[in-house]
Amino acid sequence: MHLLRIALASLANRRFTALLTVFAIALSVCLLLAVERVRTEARASFANTISGTDLIVGARSGSVNLLLYSVFRIGNATNNIRWDSFEHVAEHRQVKWAIPISLGDSHRGYRVMGTSPAYFEHYRYARSQPLNIEQGRAFADDPFEVVLGAEVAQALHYQLGEKLVLAHGVATISLVKHDDKPFTVVGILERTGTPVDRTLHISLAGMEALHVDWQNGMPARGAGVVSAEQARTMHLQPKAITAVLLGLNSKIATFSLQREINDFRGEPLLAILPGVALQELWSLMSTAEQALFVVSLFVVLTGLIGMLTAILTSLNERRREMAILRSVGARPWHIACLLILEAFALALAGVLLGLVLLYLGIAGAQGHVQANYGLYLPLAMPTRYEWTLLGAILAAALLMGCVPAWRAYRQSLADGLSIRL
Amino acid sequence: MSQALIELANLGFAWPGQAQLLDIPSFTLQRGESLFLKGPSGSGKTTLLGLLGGVQTPNRGSIRLLDQELSALSASARDRFRVDHTGYIFQQFNLLPFLSVRDNVELPCHFSKSRAQRAIQRHGSIDQAAASLLAHLGLNEPTLLERRADELSIGQQQRVAAARALIGQPELVIADEPTSALDFDAREAFLQLLFAECREAGASLLFVSHDQSLAPLFDRSLSLAELNRAARPQEI
């Protein structure tokens, strides 16, 4: 115990360099844990994007591509699915529910998705959480009603009852606007932390109404124009949709139905298992994530090497201290222990301060990160894995402490009780 | 048990690759005796103290401390033996500046069980032993105990060092130029206190200095050059 007291008193005597060392270690520890947390949360929120859906069906392309546009609203479908193909799939005896999805329009950079009321009923995210409507209601019979994702409503300050104009295409700046057919906000969804927050939901009929008078990908002119009022009276049955989300009666049927859809003779379709595709997509990103982790490990190593340097440079000016300790009975291994204790104390203080910085940082940035990146960083106790990391840092510090300890051991054997300064 | 505390016989020592530094046919220090050993710098004085402390081992001959042949002990046993039986006072900067006066004085008791036991036997506790020794040495302000050692004057620091050398009653106190940083009046006062405390503790005092003027205050006075056959005039 008294060795620890001496080590701490000696450190306190060199408090400026000691504090700098502690701070360097603390920052590196904080960085490592922050990267680890963001990584874990990103992975979790990624996996939480969609759940409860057994198969996603789209036109034949790649599974990652299909997942990206149908779930993450990234990229575009290469082709559509005919409505009768949708009906064929939806009526399969193994299918419990089918959600048609129609994409292609946008509103100020946010994607517009045409779907059916089944979407609000059956779509699940995270651990089987349903979509909840925070204000208002789902869209009903009128085709020009829109339900906003939480982020859309928040970022664009939309209230219930407001009118908004959708744009054709998905570019942020769109030259063609559907300004003849404005939509009314009838509902705003609760925040989910998934791409749903960034989506405007309209009915398939609404999607159809927007394009009912279009020809060859261009809006109609003159006599061909169909007004919103006219559109309301029309039978707005879509001819094609972009993708289908399927829920099955039995999970066991998933693979057979997948094969069946992939072999569908009507048109080339692709069915994917969302979990598998998510895995595939994540593995694409995990390289960057791992690189980040490795970089932060090296930052910790740098912090520890800084500590090693600080202790080693102090050794020479502390020869007198060592000699005095030897003269009052400290044996060379006491001196070695003293230096290992010193390294450990510095690292421990660094780790603790790092944790404090981490929690302060999370508490400060939590709201911002959630709002901007949809990542929820919990103020939770360190996980077992994080404890392991911290333990490994302390172990590395102990190991590094052996270097100055060995040098001081040799030095105090050579110097004995006297030093010639 | 013989009356001799230190007995050197036929001692020879040379640093590796250098000429013989010490060649002492015989030397004895009696129990309770105070001895002035005159040795200018470069005369092998520091090396001799290192040998007596068991930090170095002689090339030949024997060093017996309290009838124990030092070279028969292992290095760590010599370390333990040293702290159990010897207290040291050096020239200056004897103390760990970042510890309190009390912690400095009590240091040997942390490394030597026997000195801790003796301090407790005599004074009740280690803290009381430290306070009482410091009081005897004229440092009886109660607040002084908790002050950092480097806040004290040099004279006070040397008295703290003396208290540290004496705590737990080691049989031998080795003082290496402890007064060189003090002015003349302070020197004599310091020595009187040191003598009194050594007498009370029954400790022998081996006092090494180049300052001949202090020699008459001791029981016996010797010159290292007389002892050491290896000493050559040009080295002095």
Image (spheres, coloured by chain):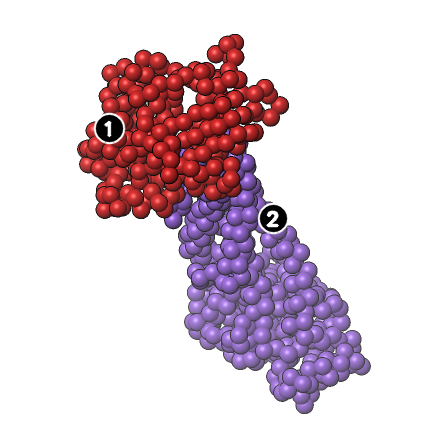
Chain colours: A purple, B red
**B102 or A227: which is nearer to us?**
B102
Residue farthest top in this picture:
B234
Q: Is label 1 or label 2 in front? A: 1
Q: Can residue A233 be seen by looking at this rendering?
A: yes
Residue found at x 48% / y 70% = A189
Residue found at x 44% / y 62% = A380
C-alpha gap between disc 1 and disc 2: 66 Å
Instruction: Tell me which chain the residue with mark 1 is part of.
Output: B
Q: Can residue A182 be seen by looking at this rendering?
A: no
Whole-percent x and y of residue A72? 61, 65
At label 2, counting other C-alpha atoms closer than 10 Å, the crowd grade (few under 14, some 14-19, many 20 or more) is some
Residue found at x 49% / y 63% = A383
Instruction: Tell me, yes or no, whether dots 1 and 2 are on the same chain.
Output: no
Find residue A295 and name its label: 2
Q: Which residue is mark 1?
A: B196
Residue farthest front in this picture:
B2
**B139 or A272: which is nearer to us?**
B139
